[in-house]
């Protein structure tokens, strides 16, 4: 049974930092490319960052230089380090897994999803 559990969300002031872990189980974590998506109220879900099975990364322009995605295959855990948070980063954050080498932030490329963790940034 595949499980992906995001934690680490919360409320933070603008300029602050958060780390979001996503613990995965039920599949071979190292064989899947991983990504973070987010959905703000009233908006469509958007891709934030991805890390492929070789460790290659890609980021949405809105988070480049502020967010860092990483993975620990030994712990089957994905991370998103978020620094210099802005109000517009407020959203529900989801981790997602796609089989093999995936290098795109289109939702259809990912077949396993977590339930999400809320991040709220206040000024």
Image (tube, rainbow, N blue to C red):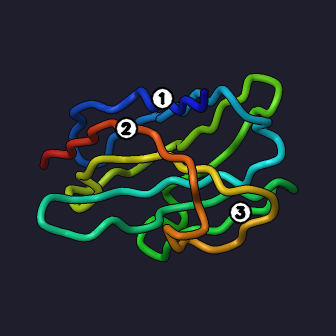
Find disc 2 in the rendering and name its residue.
Answer: 115
Q: In this view, does 87 lie to the left or right of 4?
A: left
Q: Distance between the residues labelled 2 and 3?
A: 23 Å
Q: Name the residue under label 1.
A: 5
Q: Say left or right for 51 vs 109.
A: right
Picture residue at 73% right of the left edge, 67% below the top = 102
* Marks 2 and 1 in Cβ contact (< 8 Å): yes
Q: Which label sits in the foreground, 1 or 3?
A: 1
Q: At numbered mark 1, what does the secondary structure look like: helix, strand or loop? A: strand
Relative to 75, residue 54 above or below = below
Relative depth, front residue between 114 and 56:
114
Give the secondary structure at mark 2.
Answer: loop
- The tag on residue 20 is none
Question: Which residue occupies the foreground of this view, 84 or 22?
Answer: 22
Image disc number at residue 57 = 3
Q: Residue at x 29, y 56 (%)?
A: 89
Earlier in the chain: of badge 2 and badge 3, it is: 3
Q: Is residue 33 above or below residue 26?
A: below
Q: Disc 3 on helix, strand or loop? A: strand
């Amino acid at each position: 049974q595949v499980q992906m559990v995001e934690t680490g969300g919360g409320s933070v002031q603008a300029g602050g930092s958060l780390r979001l872990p996503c613990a995965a189980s039920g599949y071979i974590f190292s064989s899947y490319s991983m990504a973070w998506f987010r959905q703000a109220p009233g908006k469509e879900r958007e891709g934030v960052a991805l890390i492929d099975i070789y460790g290659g990364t890609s980021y949405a322009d809105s988070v480049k230089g502020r967010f860092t995605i990483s993975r620990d295959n030994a712990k089957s855990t994905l991370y998103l380090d978020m620094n210099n948070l802005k109000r517009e980063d407020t959203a529900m954050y989801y981790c997602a897994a796609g089989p093999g080498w995936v290098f795109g932030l289109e939702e259809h490329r990912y077949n396993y999803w977590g339930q999400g963790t809320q991040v709220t940034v206040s000024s």
